Amino acid sequence: MQKIPGPKQLPVIGNALLFSPLGPYKVENLIEGFADLHKKYGDVVHLKLNRELVLLFNPNDIQKMYKHEGKYPNRPTFEALIKYRKENHQCVGIVPDNGKEWYRLRQSIIEILHLKTVHSYWSRQKEVAQDFAQTLLSFPADGVSNDFLHHAFLYSLEAVGILCYGRRLDCISSCSKEGAKIAEANIEFLKALGETFHGLPWWKLWKTDSYKRLESSQDFMMKISLKYLSDARTRMLKELSTFAEQEPFLFNLLNNPTLTETEINLLLTELFQGGIDATATTISMMLHDIAKHPIVQSALYQDLKENEPKPGRYSPLLRACLKETLRIHPTASANSRILDSAAIFSGFHVPEGTLVVGVNPVISKNECFFRNPFEFDPWRWLSGKNEIHPYSVLPFGHGARMCPGRRFAEQEILLCVSEIIKRYQVVSFNEREIRMKLATNLIPADNISLGFIAR
Ligand code: HEM
């Protein structure tokens, strides 16, 4: 590799100390660490953590990274999850797998990115959003929640349950014991996944505490998923044609002859889990951002009164608020690929097989690409959208491996926020700006405290 700038490396361990208790950065504050490395070394930075990697801070380079991702885009895998799944379920699933097997499974869920499929869930998702908005009135302290993220978790569980299992799971109510257990297991799973990914791999030698928590939370999610899946199968056998019409995605998956029963359950578990955390964080941060900006909130309310959302047709300002929240508070810490062929990034040659990390959360707050980058200004996506580099903000990734739940998540979030803003004036009780911390995904570091005043 040509000499790419980067911090000095120690023999064998390279830069491993940078994010250790002895170093200047914390894993939890990964993005701040990356931003500092960008300031010190420029747009392309070479690091050796548990492997060699190259950080990219220029959107033109990120565009190029996707050109070199190949037919089967490879991401660094979650080895501990692979071990657990191979030993317990004899298959690996979409999230941690790479190569041809990833492609085969990914093809079997591709239709959830088709707008026709996503829109067919519109009415039922809208009902979920309306029920959720209604429950905000029952918050104990006069419509105030000091931990809104918890409620958003329950909403996203309920909404993604419609896609995955074709039914309401009755999770929205804060009395739902099952909802709370699923939300808890998912948080535990993501924490343990992050620990086994970033820490030293002692779990290869014995079952560490993180590995045990990964195992138990994943066992729980697979069991819950199997219960809902069996129920869906019974309903399908009773009323085949109604089921096929109402549950296009689930029907095709259950009748896909190339998939085993365990693979179907694993795919649904992955979608179910993939659909909880990032969606709930985005809804919570979007409401927080809107609440902190009363001018945006009243313009949005007017817009929503005049433009009732329809499948695929939302108030442009509402869409812009979502983009702006995902620009300032993205849930993915980076977009990475293992290069399928050699590439040149900002003049530096990087060989095939290198792990390349596009640090979009730093780019999206760089004033070279966004004026007043820390200001929540949704209008920049309306009047100034032609100036925005298309690879500067990529909250759902990009290319053949882009988030398969993207369209579904957007529908779920836009419906939820519009139903809430139509009914309530939302106020924020957080005095400090909310920081995001890394727990596999980026999540709010503080509780999100919101109040809902009926209009
Ligand atoms: C705001 C909400 C969401 C955000 C920001 C988000 C973001 C992402 C990102 C950045 C990736 C990696 C993409 C890449 O490597 O290019 C991803 C992958 C994935 N997401 Fe999402 N996601 C969201 C919601 C959802 C939902 C609702 C589902 C399920 C219905 C889902 C299921 C998945 C799955 C299964 C993968 C792995 C795909 C693969 O490796 O091929 N996500 N998501």
Image (cartoon, rainbow, N blue to C red):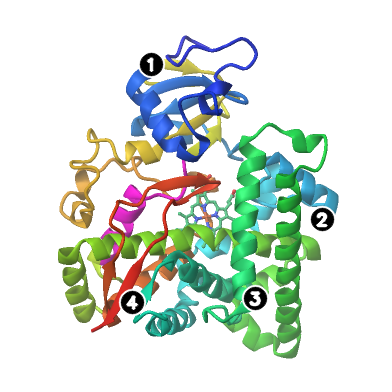
Q: Residue at x 66, y 51 (%)?
A: 94
Q: Amino acid at mark 3?
A: Glu
Task: Give SS at disc 1.
Answer: loop
- Which of the pair 450/396 is nearer the observer? 450
> 8 left or right of 161?
left
Start-end of magenta stretch: 318-333
Above or below: residue 36 compared with residue 120: above
Is label 1 or label 4 in front?
4
Q: Earlier in the sequence, mark 1 or mark 2?
A: 2
Chain-order first, disc 4 or disc 2: 2
The image quarter containing residue 358 is top left
Q: Amino acid at mark 2?
A: His
Q: Residues within 10 Å of mark 1 (few under 14, many from 20)?
A: few
Label 4 Cα neighbours within 10 Å, binned few <14 / some 14-19 / many ≥20? many
Say which residue label 1 marks.
347
- Which of pointers 3 and 4 lies earlier in the amino acid sequence? 3
Q: Is residue 410 visible?
A: yes
Crowding at label 2, few (<14), some or many (≥20) Cα neighbours within 10 Å?
Answer: some
The disc placed on residue 178 is 3
